[in-house]
């Protein structure tokens, strides 16, 4: 008997923000800790900060109150204001590493920002369920929290209480 594996489609989320691509890129990459809802979406204990180091090979990580750092991934592409890509290893082994790619494209009304999270096939039987969880997670983190922050909304104006920092 042959078992055929079907590819698991990437999670793709798109928002349009009312700012130029260079500013949208900076808000995403440089201000990660200002818009990421770290109280709800974290891996280590007592998180206080999360960072993307601005270079290929840079770390993506969170930091706890005691200074302990928990890796989220490694920057694979850092091309402002067009593209940012990093591995994603949150709760995964090195063999299960995912890819998160964010593209910034100028539009009449601002910048189209597209996040693609792929590599689900590496997760075997857990791929479909984890993809579904991340689909919901990115809806909050990216489509709500990042978009509201990039559009200049104050914490009390943001669409989700999870986005208050």
Image (cartoon, rainbow, N blue to C red):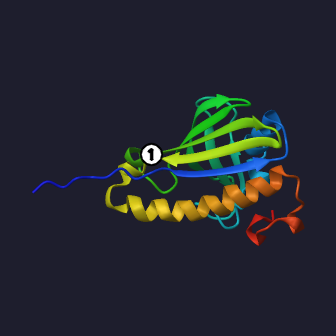
Q: Position of residue 151 (x, y in %)?
A: 85, 52
Q: Nearer the viewer, residue 25 or 40?
A: 25
Above or below residue 147? Residue 102 is above
Q: Position of residue 100 (x, y in %)?
A: 56, 44
Is 1 left, or right, of 12 in this rendering?
Answer: left
- Residue at 63% x, 53% y is 68
Crowd class of label 1 (few under 14; some 14 to 19; many from 20; radius 10 Å)? some
Above or below residue 18? Residue 128 is below
Where disc 1 sits, the SS reads: loop
Occupied quadrant, residue 57? top right
- Residue at 86% x, 64% y is 155
Q: Specify whether residue 116 is in view.
A: yes
Of the 4 image quadrants, the one containing the N terminus is: bottom left
Above or below residue 120? Residue 162 is below
Tag count in the figure? 1
Q: Residue furthest left?
A: 1
Of the 4 image quadrants, the one containing the C terminus is: bottom right
Q: Nearer the viewer, residue 55 or 10?
A: 10
Is 45 left, or right, of 127 in this rendering?
Answer: right
Is 59 left, or right, of 124 in this rendering?
Answer: right
From the image, tell me which residue sits under label 1. Answer: 97
Q: Residue furthest front?
A: 108
- Residue at 72% x, 43% y is 112
Q: Specify whether residue 44 is in view.
A: no
Occupied quadrant, residue 129? bottom left
């Amino acid at each position: 008997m042959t078992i055929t594996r079907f590819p698991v489609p990437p999670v793709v989320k798109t928002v349009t923000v009312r700012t130029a691509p260079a500013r949208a890129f900076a808000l995403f990459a440089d201000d990660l800790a200002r818009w990421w809802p770290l109280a709800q979406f974290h891996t280590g204990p007592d998180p206080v900060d999360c960072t993307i180091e601005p270079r290929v090979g840079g770390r993506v990580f969170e930091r706890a109150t005691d200074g302990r750092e928990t890796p989220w991934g490694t920057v694979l592409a850092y091309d402002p204001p067009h593209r940012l890509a990093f591995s994603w290893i949150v709760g995964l082994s090195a063999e299960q590493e995912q890819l998160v790619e964010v593209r910034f494209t100028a539009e009449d009304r601002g910048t189209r920002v597209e996040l693609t999270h792929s590599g689900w096939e590496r997760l075997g039987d857990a791929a479909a369920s984890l993809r579904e969880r991340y689909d919901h997670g990115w809806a909050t983190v990216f489509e709500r929290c990042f978009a509201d922050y990039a559009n200049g909304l104050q914490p009390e104006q943001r669409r989700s209480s999870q986005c208050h920092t």
